[in-house]
Image (spheres, grey):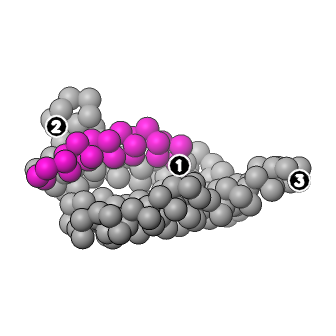
Amino acid sequence: MLAATVFFLVQHGQVDKKFKDSMLVAALITGIAAVHYYYMRDQWAEGLGSPTELRYVDWILTVPLMVVEFALLTGVGMRKLFWASVIMLVTGYFGESGVTGMLDAQTWGAISGAAYFYMAYEVGCFTVFTGSGPQGDVGTALANAQGKIPAAGRMLQWFVLVGWAIYP
């Protein structure tokens, strides 16, 4: 992750102006992840068990930043996706850690899962199976974009669909 951070920072000066913000956000995401992974490694090495809190701190910082990448590509959807990602992660943490004592893990997981599926719909993830179908504002903007953005959007849709499935 640290190498990726350096790469994004070095490449920042080499890319077209319209991609500079995206490169900085990517550097921020990988930089935050590098720091957290370093501390998570120490927690495991010292026999302190699962680094649940560190994982969720990392995710609550990096996942909303990944949402910013969609907005930078499409110009739409940032507010809805941002809040859905926060809801997904906070309720996922409540379910995994049991810190609230209010609801059981399955209920928190269902709330978190609903936020995940909402985000998957918004970015058009369900179109990866059919090539068409229902999609939200971001998915529509990705599909209608020019140049390499639709192809990049499809990769991001797969990333959200598969990669983010661990969060709820």
Which one is closest to the eye, mark 1 or mark 3?
3
5 over 155 or under it: above or below: below
Front residue of 134/20: it is 20
Q: Residue at x 44, y 64 (%)?
A: 10
Image disc number at residue 167:
1
Q: Which residue is mark 3?
A: 46
User: Distance of mark 2 from mark 1, alpha carbons?
Assistant: 25 Å
Type of amino acid under label 1: Tyr
As drawn, which residue projects farthest toward the top?
130
x%, y% of residue 33?
Answer: 59, 59
Type of amino acid under label 3: Glu
Q: Residue at x 45, y 66 (%)?
A: 9
Q: Which residue is mark 2?
A: 133
x%, y% of residue 43?
Answer: 81, 55
User: Distance of mark 1 from mark 3, alpha carbons?
Assistant: 25 Å
x%, y% of residue 60?
Answer: 54, 64
Disc 2 element: loop
Assess disc 1: are there few (<14), some (14-19) or many (≥20) residues with their C-alpha within 10 Å of its C-alpha.
Answer: some
Answer whether residue 146 is visible to the viewer in this image.
yes
Labels 1 and 3: the sequence-earlier one: 3
Disc 1 element: loop
Q: Where are the magenta residues, as a range?
A: 145-168
| Magenta run includes residue 83 | no
Labels 2 and 1: the sequence-earlier one: 2
Disc 3 element: loop
